[in-house]
Image (cartoon, rainbow, N blue to C red):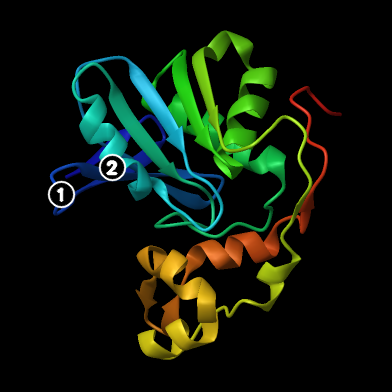
Amino acid sequence: MNRTTGSEHEVDSPTMDGYVRRSFGVDGRVLSYLDFGGPGPALIALHGHFSEGADFAPLAERLGCPWRVMALDKRGHGESDRATDYERGGYVDDVTALLDHLGLAEAAILGHFLGGVSAYQFAGRNPNRVTAIVVEDIGAVCDIDLTFARNLPDLVATRDGLVEALGTAAPYLERTFRRRAEGWASPSTRATRSGPSRHSPVTTGRTG
């Protein structure tokens, strides 16, 4: 089902697991998210590096009806379009765009790893829009070296070739593989490679 929301065109695509994949436009890009349904208050789930929103499916199933879990594919990950900017502020802006698109004045925010950074930075900049925050597997100050991601492959002709090129990282990334017209890729490796090579330290406050 397609529907127009404000100036944006939203596309709904039912998944094999019974929930709905939705997408909307922002700044010339498409952002995709999974809506696990439910009549309860909104819980926005933000995934970490080398991941995507589908990772929250087991959590959404266990939480059940008390919450309506919506998991964003962060820019350059999953089904969301690539971007030219992978700085922290861009990820925070995408969370704002999702809430605005959903017509939500406020929501609970859950973030894992990279998503945790986005969660507490969003809360720091928009405290009136956060009813609760859960940050998993990352601290307020961190020193994470991601330079290894610069050596990960971008696009490979076959799936087997991508597995071979990723080496020991392949088992952790297989769930993110996507077949494109030009070959096989793991979108999350592209986004991580294009972003900051280190995170140290991080701040929740406004800058600039």
Q: Position of residue 86 (x, y in %)?
A: 67, 52
The residue nearer to you, when weighing 17 against 87, is 17
Q: Quadrant of residue 158?
A: bottom left
Q: Position of residue 31 (x, y in %)?
A: 45, 47
At x 68%, y 63%, the residue is 194
Q: Residues within 10 Å of mark 1 (few under 14, many from 20)?
A: few
At x 46%, y 13%, the residue is 105
Left/right of residue 205 with respect to residue 107 in the rendered view: right
- Label 2 to label 1, Cα distance in Å? 9 Å
Q: Secondary structure at mark 2?
A: helix
Q: Residues within 10 Å of mark 2 (few under 14, many from 20)?
A: some
Question: From this viewpoint, is residue 14 visible?
Answer: yes
Upstream in sequence: badge 2 or badge 1 = 1
At x 49%, y 58%, the residue is 81
Pointer 1: what residue?
Answer: 17
Q: Secondary structure at mark 1?
A: loop
Pointer 2: what residue?
Answer: 57
Left/right of residue 68 with respect to residue 86 in the rendered view: left
Q: Quadrant of the N terminus?
A: top left
At x 42%, y 85%, the residue is 183
Q: Position of residue 57 (x, y in %)?
A: 28, 42
Question: From this viewpoint, is residue 158 visible?
Answer: no
Badge 2 vs badge 1, beta-carbon distance below 8 Å: yes
Left/right of residue 116 with respect to residue 161 in the rendered view: right
Counting every numbered tag in the picture gives 2
The residue nearer to you, when weighing 82 against 158, is 158
Q: Position of residue 84 (x, y in %)?
A: 67, 58
The vertical placement of 88 against 40, above or below, is: below
Left/right of residue 57 with respect to residue 81 in the rendered view: left
